[in-house]
Image (tube, coloured by chain):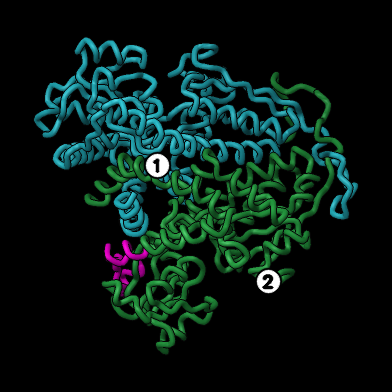
Chain colours: A cyan, B green
Amino acid sequence: AAGVASSTVSAAPAVHTGLPAIKWRMTSSFPKSVDTLFGSAEMLANRVREITGGKFDIRIHAPGEIVPALMALDAVQQNTVEMCHTCSYYYVGKDKAFGFGTAIPFGLNARQMDAWIIAGNGQQLLDEFYANYNLYSFLGGNTGVQMGGWYRKQISTVDDIKGLKIRIAGLGGEILSRMGAVPQQLGGGDIYTSLEKGTIDAAEWVAPYDDEKLGLYKVAPYYYSPGWWEPGPVVHFFVNRQEWDKLPKEYQAAFRAASREAHILMTSTYDHKNPQALARLLGQGVKLQGFSNEIMKKAYDVSRELYAEEAAKNPAWAKIYADFDKYRKSQNAWFGVAEAGFDRFMQSVR
Amino acid sequence: AAGVASSTVSAAPAVHTGLPAIKWRMTSSFPKSVDTLFGSAEMLANRVREITGGKFDIRIHAPGEIVPALMALDAVQQNTVEMCHTCSYYYVGKDKAFGFGTAIPFGLNARQMDAWIIAGNGQQLLDEFYANYNLYSFLGGNTGVQMGGWYRKQISTVDDIKGLKIRIAGLGGEILSRMGAVPQQLGGGDIYTSLEKGTIDAAEWVAPYDDEKLGLYKVAPYYYSPGWWEPGPVVHFFVNRQEWDKLPKEYQAAFRAASREAHILMTSTYDHKNPQALARLLGQGVKLQGFSNEIMKKAYDVSRELYAEEAAKNPAWAKIYADFDKYRKSQNAWFGVAEAGFDRFMQSVR
């Protein structure tokens, strides 16, 4: 296709002449087997290579090849690798404000996160915070609302939460802990056996497409919705600031565009695959349940307490939360009108 | 930023050397005043220029500068211009199957359209159809669910639709016509006066951000939701097939990535601006109303009749609809679980 002859093509000097060959390493927090997540990183790398004729070459490394899964952010901060694909909320142990970039319980859904980051104050507020860790952030995917996980028994009331041993991390785990549950940290590979043995009573993972692969329905048939702790979780490309600043502006532009394409690919792929997986799971006898309003409301109230406490002692949290929370209210006032009105009807006639 | 010195930068030969300078013209169906729509075309053009160091240069032309607003597709088909920014459903007069690419009544919402086109069979089915018009299609924005328009009086029952003179075009107009309404075709500039004089009883436009500018609330205070005829309307970049095939593959890749970035920018911008506009409108005394389930159900049933009739006589419609309708059912079965469960709760506590 390069042999072009057309009145719109002139023999102007080639502007790209002399742009450098650049090799970057991207460490991922996700194994290749989680193909929707890993695939978005592949799309970014492939597209950037295509655009630059192979000159800007980003190689992806699975967790453990160079850097352990949950050290990805640290490796970029220290410039061990130029960039990573991870979720900011994996790092709430450093600062709870890392939650905002991905998801906080009862936060924004996927479209609302996009609006806040792309058109609202989100990108600026987050990058101001990430600057403390020597990072620039780029949207790198969104799973959509996740599910509430797999339970060996029904839980209907706030009382049923008490003593519940549930595999869940992060702020969702903190809220459930305040409600009397006993959050557990377990790798994906250990969930099945722990549920089977009754070492744990429940476990959250992602949503039907990823959950199906773990086979948890065989040992914990009650499948609860929604995962109120992960309403629209964003996955990130984090880039070391010095390495970014060294890029030619053409490569920065290529990266920006390609990362946005990778971002939307992930949501669309999940939205495409989850319905089919849900249908298969229901065919296996999975018992689909919604969390009761009593449980949702109690968890929501606890989240508000937690956030107020954090705001009182953490200026980074306070600054971002003020904007985020105002945005949430405004967004839900609008999404409750046209989007919800339409969706509700379509779900009723399907 | 081009003066790079780093261990990851080598002196490999410049692959972009010799790529041609290319100038394209994009005719838009949207005036600059509709800034969210026009802005997405600008983003595409700007990003492609940035990526290619100015060598791939797309100039945007407002409606009428080269081509009238609703002749954009024809102009690309005939290669008067290389590309356009328009909505495929403006061309349902040629073939009703042009509806699918943008929106059909009671079709897919914005995220579902993305999933169908990006991860499902949508892109392939649509491009097979557009090939008859010598076009390639690229996602170029989505407004989200639109509103149901402005009404001088309340309409509560199917009987209230009878004789209603409403400004609405396309398949939505056909459905309302079958329900006894009298659809009218009016340019945006004539709506206000016609409503004021009572020449028409109602008019649909877009959603709060764009609607506010027309000031229709002053003459038709009942603002209905949702616009069931436009659940997730996609805006398109259509490209002439021969011109596309002539592009160097690096420019094709740049265009693909930049168009996806433009696509998501539009939705995020609308999602950002609509809530603020809705709040202002409510402050002006606008009476927000939801269409009754009776009206929604009747319109839905009529849409099913219309689609069955069209499938019986139009093979292009029949082929796309079979896939689209199956997709819709599967999507709503899933979106009714986690997304709706979460959103419903958040809308209740705001």
Which residue is identified by label 1?
A: B330
- Residue at position x 59%, y 46% from top? B125
In the picture, measured across the screen, residue B169 lies left or right of residue A176, that is right
| Residue A76 in view of the camera | yes
**Is disc 1 surrounded by few (<14), some (14 to 19) or many (20+) residues within 10 Å?**
some
Above/below status of A244 relative to B48: above
What amino acid is at disc 2? Pro
Does B285 lie within the magenta span?
yes
Determine the secondary structure under disc 1: helix
Res. B68 mark: 2
Which is closer to the viewer, label 1 or label 2? 1
Q: Residue furthest front?
A: B312
Stretch in magenta: B280-299
What amino acid is at disc 1? Ser
Q: Position of residue A68 (x, y in %)?
A: 47, 14
The residue nearer to you, when weighing B243 against B272, is: B243
Q: CA distance from mark 1 to mark 2?
A: 39 Å
